[in-house]
Image: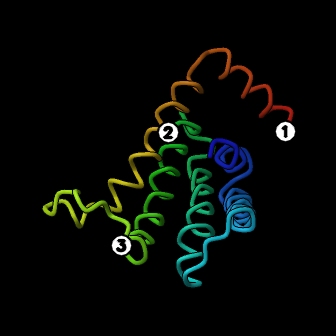
Amino acid sequence: MLFIVLVANWYGVKTGMLVGFAYGILQFLQEPYFLTLFQVCCDYVLAFAALGLAGLFRGKKNSLLTGYIAAVLARGVFHSIGGYLYWMDYMPENFPLALRNLYPIIYNYSYLLAEAAVTVLVIKIPAVEQALERVRKAAL
């Protein structure tokens, strides 16, 4: 997710969403799972294009960090919508019934937020921050 967010942070929302869209299509081509066209859009196209929303924070203080967190949350929304519509049958039988309606949110954000936490820790390492800044300057 970080590389799509970096593009959005450096070049803006439009370019970031285009890169996310292309990445989503490539993901689908590599590991296609097709139930319906809308499911493909939720799980691949829209979810990864949403990472481009990080570009909304471009030029603001802590833009990479803020944009990354917002992008991860946006991606989770589309995966959760797909979860509600298509993947509820895969909910474990021992999952608490009181939380049944939260299952897609819990499932999707459990791995997205774990990855986000690790990525945030890594990008806050001073050497990584400096390296990303050098790459940003070279890219622009």
**Which circle, 3 or 1, is nearer the viewer?**
3
> Upstream in the sequence, badge 2 or badge 3?
3
Q: Position of residue 35 (x, y in %)?
A: 55, 81
Q: Classify residue 137 by image quadrant.
A: top right
Residue most extreme to the left: 98
List the residue tagged with mark 2.
116
Q: Position of residue 66 (x, y in %)?
A: 50, 41
List the residue tagged with mark 3.
89
Q: Are marks 2 and 3 in contact (CB under 8 Å)?
A: no
**Which circle, 2 or 1, is nearer the viewer?**
2
In the image, what residue type sits under mark 2? Ala
| Along the line of sight, the residue nearer the viewer: 30 or 122 | 30
List the residue tagged with mark 1.
139
Q: Position of residue 140 (x, y in %)?
A: 83, 40
Is 54 positioned to the left or the right of 135 in the image?
left
> Upstream in the sequence, badge 3 or badge 1?
3
Q: Residue at x 59, y 38 (%)?
A: 64
> Upstream in the sequence, badge 2 or badge 1?
2
Give the total of numbered labels. 3
In the image, what residue type sits under mark 1? Ala
Residue most extreme to the front: 93
Q: Secondary structure at mark 1?
A: helix
Q: What is the spatial separation of the Cα atoms under label 2 and label 1, in whole angstroms?
A: 24 Å
Q: Residue at x 37, y 54 (%)?
A: 107
Q: Which numbered disc covers residue 60?
A: none
Q: What is the spatial separation of the Cα atoms under label 2 and label 3, in whole angstroms?
A: 27 Å
Q: What is the spatial separation of the Cα atoms under label 3 and label 1, in whole angstroms?
A: 45 Å
Q: Residue at x 19, y 59 (%)?
A: 99
Q: Residues within 10 Å of mark 3 (few under 14, many from 20)?
A: few
Is 81 positioned to the left or the right of 14 in the image?
left
Q: Residue at x 68, y 50 (%)?
A: 8
